[in-house]
Image: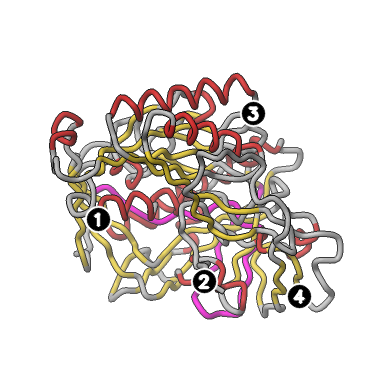
Amino acid sequence: MRLSLGNISIKDVQFGNQTEVKNGVLYVNKAEMIAHLADERLASIDLDLARPGEATRIMPVKDVIEPRVKVEGQGGIFPGFVGKVDMVGEGVTHVLKGAAVITTGKIVGFQEGIIDMSGPGAEYTPFSALNNVVVIAHPTLGLLQHEHEAALRIMGFKAATYLGEAGRSVTPDEVITYDCPSLPVALTQYPELPKVAYVYMLQSQGLLHDTYLYGIDVKRILPTFIYPTEVMDGAIVSGNCVSACDKNTTYHHQNSPVIAELLARHGQDYNFIGVVVTNENVTLADKERSSNFTAKLIGWLGVDAAIISEEGFGNPDADLMMNCVKLERQGIKTVLVTDEYAGQDGASQSLADADPLADAVITAGNANEVITLPPMKKVIGYSEVADVIAGGWHGSLQKDGTITAEIQVITGATNELGFSKLTSKAI
């Protein structure tokens, strides 16, 4: 597949009489957009704006989505939800680079998070650097949690595609083209370079821990091959209400740094063969089944090495280790990308499972690290949830608006795709 991403640089976002992109500014017709998002499951919908450097806090954050529009090629953005269930990943897609949709409102699950647009919290999330259109939605009385989540999820996709249309006829500031050949061709390219595959673990434990592939709940699939470019076109989307620090929002999937880096170095340092999507399960039998299928598919490709990224922590650590061990036993060198829950002092066991064969591990940070977030002049959403979201505790929210909690509360702080600002240093 051949996909061109036309990046349109967005430097500001404002409300205006017409939804359009002009001179790097995204103008949003507020009334028109709210009408476009109407859903009988939602009692009210409102919009607000949050720009880099502003003294603004957004919480609880449900999802972050990048506005995109398909201008050439089959399918549309978010197949199975907004677009038809056509294959995506080829043609031309325009991207409003520097803009995002953030969904918030009444809390769905206890693991939604916080985005600060300035201050120390802003240093932990990549979304503080974006021009954000925040959609605030309140559910109808008595709406069950799963329906509430579905309503917010689809509202976010509709909001991103509505804004993405503003870039349809705009000339991009840059165009990046990715060419991913068929498997027989890929396997014979660059014979002098090591062959590498990517195992993309997706949260799928149910109870609001869900991810979707072409509209299908990932816990209902067996591991499967996909083209890297399918991910960029919205084939994978988030439905998660899980720990904010290491959940993959839809924005993370659209901009996966693992896939982007593998494609950028393809033909230079290694031969990137493709992606195997797998799930994270609850029962031992399901974990064994999926890890067996993952190992079979990766072995079938005949690669020399693989990268595995986890999503979440605790129970999925077992899936991570199973995938790793079964690849290593085939002689496939495997690197893991995860994060840690090592306690607030960093002295506890980092992962819930481990194995000697997992000897190449990249950490995205310790989610239990404690931070104090100063009060903000403006809060979009509800500050009081700070005492109940994962990483907070009774008394996290102080009377002046200060929040003391673990960085687990910050959306994207320890993202296991490496889409974060944390690093390490030798001491």
Quick check: is 230 in the magenta stretch? no
Q: Is residue 53 magenta?
A: yes
Left or right, residue 178 beside residue 279: left
Q: Quadrant of the N terminus?
A: top left
Instruction: Say which residue appears at 30% left-offset and 24% top-offset.
Output: 300
Q: Position of residue 117 (x, y in %)?
A: 56, 73
Q: Nearer the viewer, mark 3 or mark 4?
A: 3
- Looking at the rendering, the stretch of residues picked out in magenta corresponds to 43-70
Q: In front: 242, or 424?
A: 424
In-front residue for pair 413/316: 316
Q: Is residue 84 left or right of residue 414?
A: left
The residue where tag 4 is placed is 402
Q: Quadrant of residue 215?
A: top left
What residue would you read off at disc 3? 282
- Amino acid marked by disc 2: Lys
Along the line of sight, which residue is nearer the eye, 182 or 251? 182
Q: How far apart are the alpha carbons under marks 3 and 1?
A: 35 Å
